[in-house]
């Protein structure tokens, strides 16, 4: 739970106080120590695995870099392949919170050193802080070494009283907590019941359940990402934006340029392009897409439903590539993309592939029975207040995404352009909503972030 734990504000406050009150030369050590404590807070073995991966990555990167400089490319390649093999084995056979995110960072870092795109970092403290930095540790973003480590080395220049930075950070935090606690965590109560026993619901409610999960996973993961960005910005560190209004996309390829951006760009740079990308004709491109999305599915989980979800997006992407290759124009692209993504999320949310197929089967055969909708709403504990809060929250997120998509700007940055009175009013309304509907609302239950499992 961590970010939504009542203890987290005290933890963050203590880290901020130490960061700005202690001598500036200690700042990277403060973040390193805080990040290690954060890992211990999750579970002691999480820190052990992180240290193991960090030591190996640090040492192998230096060895690869030195081998490259000596012209020993075979030695460098052997080191790279063996280490990546070890990390892939860890991903396949061992699960630990945050591991898939920092292992992808490690593989990308080692690959860049091997390619000569980046030098090896000799300071072990910076390497482990690069992996462990607590705002991004649980669910990313998957940062590149040459973006994050230079910021860790420049912490001495960060001033405490930077009104623009702190105000923007506060806005990211508020909007992230709103998306997570007011929208996502309220949706989960309804979604869990519908997906838990689809045979009890008619087609209408099963479609509603799929759509609500589509909103839930976005608000959950994007909410986490905004909180992470806000936390990091307090310390003067800029993390990668993982989302760019993805449900405003008008094609699947555009969706993946907007959804989980750090993962999609990682897969493109370290898997798709090395396999040939789109350079060897349409057929080869389609094969590469299937492989990449198959890996994407496996990264999310070992169940057949995750693999099917990834392969389904691979098929979507192939169709998208063929449509673009033929020069066809599809009207209503945004609507059809949303429908396709929503359908695929059923496989992602279901407990197994069989459960997903049962859900889809019930959705297509249960019929629509308006006469029992009121009874169903009562069964789902959807009273007038709950429905109103859900609708207002979902509509507000959708409207803000529509606005941000048109302005090509993230909401927290957009809010900073408003007058003080408007900005403070937005702060008050968001904070009020979080306190009333996020923490003290009827039936509220803190849920862990969905992507903590991956």
Image (tube, rainbow, N blue to C red):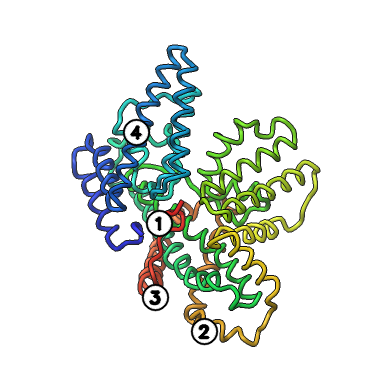
Alpha-carbon span between mark 2 and mark 4: 53 Å
Residue 110 vs 393, above or below: the answer is above
Name which of mark 4 and mark 3 comes first in the sequence. Answer: 4
Q: Secondary structure at mark 1?
A: helix
Alpha-carbon span between mark 1 and mark 4: 29 Å
Alpha-carbon span between mark 2 and mark 1: 36 Å
| Residue 241 x %, y % | 48, 47
User: Going 22% across and 52% down the picture, which residue do you hit?
Assistant: 14
In front of the other: label 1 or label 3?
3
* Contact? badges 2 and 1 (CB < 8 Å): no
Query: In the rendered image, which residue does mark 4 sit on?
Result: 127
The reply to whether residue 418 is visible in this rendering is: no
The reply to whether residue 110 is visible in this rendering is: yes
132 lies left or right of 303: left
Alpha-carbon span between mark 2 and mark 3: 17 Å
In front of the other: label 2 or label 3?
2
Alpha-carbon span between mark 4 and mark 3: 42 Å
| Residue 96 x %, y % | 39, 48
Q: Residues within 10 Å of mark 4 (few under 14, many from 20)?
A: many
Query: In the rendered image, which residue does mark 3 sit on?
Result: 441
Q: Secondary structure at mark 2?
A: helix
Q: Residues within 10 Å of mark 3 (few under 14, many from 20)?
A: some
| Residue 254 x %, y % | 64, 48
Query: In the rendered image, which residue does mark 1 sit on?
Result: 171
Residue 378 numbered tag? 2
Name which of mark 1 and mark 3 comes first in the sequence. Answer: 1
Instruction: Tell me the quarter of the image containing the N terminus.
Output: bottom left
User: Going 64% across and 64% down the picture, which residue do you hit?
Assistant: 357
């Amino acid at each position: 739970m961590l970010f939504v734990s009542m203890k987290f504000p005290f933890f963050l406050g203590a880290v901020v106080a130490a960061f700005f009150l202690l001598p500036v030369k200690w700042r990277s050590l403060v973040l390193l120590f805080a990040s290690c404590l954060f890992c211990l807070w999750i579970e002691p073995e999480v820190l052990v695995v992180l240290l193991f991966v960090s030591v190996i990555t640090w040492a192998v990167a230096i060895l690869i870099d030195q081998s490259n400089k000596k012209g020993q490319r075979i030695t460098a390649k052997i080191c790279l392949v063996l280490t990546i093999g070890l990390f892939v084995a860890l991903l396949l056979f061992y699960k630990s919170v945050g591991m898939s995110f920092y292992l992808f960072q490690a593989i990308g870092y080692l690959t860049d050193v091997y390619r000569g795109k980046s030098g090896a970092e000799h300071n072990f403290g910076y390497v482990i802080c690069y992996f462990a930095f607590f705002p991004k540790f649980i669910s990313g973003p998957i940062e590149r070494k040459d973006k994050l480590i230079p910021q860790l080395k420049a912490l001495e220049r960060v001033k405490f009283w930077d009104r623009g930075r702190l105000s923007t950070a506060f806005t990211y935090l508020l909007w992230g907590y709103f998306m997570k606690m007011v929208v996502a965590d309220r949706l989960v109560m309804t979604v869990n019941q519908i997906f838990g026993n689809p045979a009890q619901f008619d087609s209408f409610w099963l479609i509603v359940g799929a759509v609500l999960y589509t909103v839930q996973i976005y608000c959950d993961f994007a909410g986490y990402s905004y909180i992470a960005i806000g936390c990091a910005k307090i310390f003067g560190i800029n993390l990668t934006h993982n989302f760019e209004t993805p449900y405003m996309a008008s094609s699947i390829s555009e969706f993946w340029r907007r959804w989980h951006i750090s993962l999609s760009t990682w897969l493109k740079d370290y898997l798709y392009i090395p396999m040939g990308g789109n350079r060897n004709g349409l057929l080869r491109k389609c094969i590469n897409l299937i492989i990449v999305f198959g890996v994407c599915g496996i990264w999310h989980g070992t169940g057949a439903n995750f693999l099917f979800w990834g392969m389904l997006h691979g098929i979507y992407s192939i169709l998208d590539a063929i449509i673009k290759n033929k020069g066809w124009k599809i009207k209503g692209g945004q609507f059809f993309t949303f429908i396709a993504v929503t359908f695929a999320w059923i496989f992602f949310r279901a407990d197994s592939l069989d459960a997903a197929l049962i859900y889809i089967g019930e959705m297509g055969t249960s019929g629509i029975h308006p006469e029992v909708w009121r009874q169903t709403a009562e069964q789902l504990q959807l009273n007038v207040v709950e429905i109103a809060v859900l609708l207002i929250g979902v509509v507000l997120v959708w409207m803000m995404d529509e606005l941000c998509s048109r302005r090509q700007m993230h909401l927290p940055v957009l809010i900073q352009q408003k007058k003080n009175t408007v900005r403070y009013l937005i702060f008050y309304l968001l904070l009020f909503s979080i306190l009333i509907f996020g923490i003290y609302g009827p039936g509220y239950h803190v849920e862990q972030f969905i992507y903590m499992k991956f």
